[in-house]
């Protein structure tokens, strides 16, 4: 049976340095959510990604996400796909030591349904 990791919004995943890559559509959506222009959004909140072929969100000085405010994500309703996909569609070795998502054993159909709700996309269990 597949395991679905139910996020409890502990924000641990937002507190370590990383590279949240952004698409042009995500930049548009994030800027609109913050009620600022895209150019200003890019200047304030993004940096060149490590591959130097696109933009990623900036980190705060402590390595946490630029949009983490206490224990809240300032852009949660429109957070980037990469954020929505964690921890079910991607994670990294050791992430379970930080992430407090609750493992729930579900059927394959239920896993797909929950993934679609959590991430906004369809994906087959691996």
Image (cartoon, helix red, strand yellow):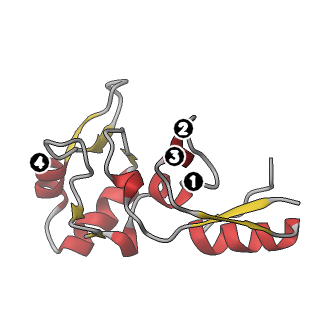
Q: Is residue 84 above or below residue 113?
A: above
Say the numbered circle drawn on residue 94. 2
Instruction: Tell me if 126 is positioned left or right of 100 in this view.
Output: right
Cβ atoms under marks 2 and 3 closer than 8 Å: yes
Cβ atoms under marks 2 and 4 closer than 8 Å: no
Say the numbered circle drawn on residue 43. 4
Q: Residue at x 11, y 48 (%)?
A: 43
Considering the numbered disc 1 on the image, is that residue within a helix, a strand or a loop?
loop
* Label 3: few (<14), some (14–19) or many (≥20) C-alpha neighbours in 10 Å: few
- Using the rendered view, name the quadrant where residue 114 is placed: bottom right
Among the two numbered marks 1 and 3 on one chain, the one whose residue lies closer to the N terminus: 1
Residue 86: x and y, percent? 54, 54
Q: Residue at x 35, y 38 (%)?
A: 18
Instruction: Give the foreground label among 1 and 3.
Output: 3
**Residue linked to disc 1:** 87
Residue 101: x and y, percent? 56, 63
Q: CA distance from mark 4 to mark 1?
A: 29 Å
* Label 4: few (<14), some (14–19) or many (≥20) C-alpha neighbours in 10 Å: few
Q: Is residue 62 above or below residue 70?
A: above
Q: CA distance from mark 2 to mark 3?
A: 6 Å
- Using the rendered view, name the quadrant where residue 109 is placed: bottom right
Considering the numbered disc 4 on the image, is that residue within a helix, a strand or a loop?
helix
Q: Residue at x 30, y 40 (%)?
A: 55
Q: CA distance from mark 2 to mark 4?
A: 33 Å
Among the two numbered marks 3 and 4 on one chain, the one whose residue lies closer to the N terminus: 4
Q: Residue at x 41, y 52 (%)?
A: 13
Instruction: Give the foreground label among 3 and 4.
Output: 3
* Label 1: few (<14), some (14–19) or many (≥20) C-alpha neighbours in 10 Å: some
């Amino acid at each position: 049976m597949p395991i679905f990791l139910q996020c409890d919004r502990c924000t641990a995943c937002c507190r370590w340095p990383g590279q949240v890559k952004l698409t042009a559509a995500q930049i548009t959506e994030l800027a609109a959510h913050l009620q600022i222009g895209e150019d200003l959004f890019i200047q304030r909140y993004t940096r060149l990604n490590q591959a130097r072929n696109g933009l990623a969100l900036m980190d705060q000085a402590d390595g946490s996400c630029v949009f983490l405010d206490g224990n809240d994500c300032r852009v949660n309703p429109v957070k980037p796909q990469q954020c929505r996909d964690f921890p079910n569609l991607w994670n990294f070795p050791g992430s379970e030591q930080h992430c407090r998502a609750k493992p729930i054993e579900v059927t394959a159909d239920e896993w797909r349904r929950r993934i679609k709700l959590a991430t906004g996309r369809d994906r087959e269990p691996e």
